[in-house]
Amino acid sequence: QVQLVESGGGLVQVGGSLRLSCAASGRTFNSVMGWFRQAPGKEREFVAAIRWSDANTAYANSVRGRFTISRDNAKNTGYLQMNSLKPEDTANYYCAAGYLMTVIARRYDYWGQGTQVIVSL
């Protein structure tokens, strides 16, 4: 069992930055951490993922070049640095853990509770 706790969400103006954190505990985490987001009335969508072993990353086209996913092995924590934020980035952001590098949410086995990001004009 893996427990995931997100933090770092909040209210930010257009063009601003936020850094989300996802602390993993429980079983040794050594697979894939993904970030997803869900806006009101919309489906959950893939944002980014990182493979723990070699830091290989993947991004959604909508965030590539603005968001950066990273991890700190020693702290068992993943991060999502979000720059140049846009109103359409407003959503609840969730981190997830799994064993496969994929954009498909149901392939991830563990989920955090989510953290809200609001980007205001």
Image (cartoon, rainbow, N blue to C red):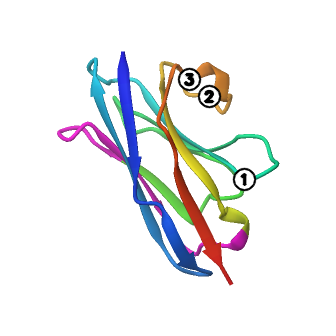
For the residues labelled 2 and 3, say whether their Cβ atoms are less than 8 Å apart: yes
Q: Which residue is mark 1?
A: 39
Which circle's residue, 1 or 3, is located before the other in the chain?
Answer: 1
Q: Residue furthest right?
A: 41
Image quadrant in which you'd find residue 33: top left
**In the displayed structure, does residue 94 sit left or right of residue 26?**
right
Residue 64, given in percent of the width and then of the height, sits at 62, 58
Q: Residues within 10 Å of mark 1 (few under 14, many from 20)?
A: some
**How many numbered callouts?**
3
**In the displayed structure, does residue 20 sit left or right of residue 73?**
right
Which circle's residue, 2 or 1, is located before the other in the chain?
Answer: 1
Q: Which residue is mark 2?
A: 102
Q: Amino acid at mark 3?
A: Tyr
Residue 92 drawn above or below residue 119: above
Badge number at residue 84: none
Q: Residue shown at 62%/73% (left/top)?
A: 119
Quarter of the picture containing the C terminus is bottom right
**In the displayed structure, does residue 17 sit left or right of residue 40?**
left
Distance, label 2 to label 3, CA atoms, is: 8 Å
Tell us which disc is closer to us: 2 or 3. Answer: 3
Residue 118 drawn above or below residue 1: below
Q: Secondary structure at mark 1?
A: loop
Residue 53, given in percent of the width and then of the height, sits at 34, 29
Q: Residue shown at 62%/20% (left/top)?
A: 107
Q: Amino acid at mark 1?
A: Ala
Q: Which residues are magenta?
A: 71-87
Residue 111 drawn above or below residue 23: above
7 drawn magenta: no
Distance, label 2 to label 1, CA atoms, is: 20 Å
Badge number at residue 108: 3
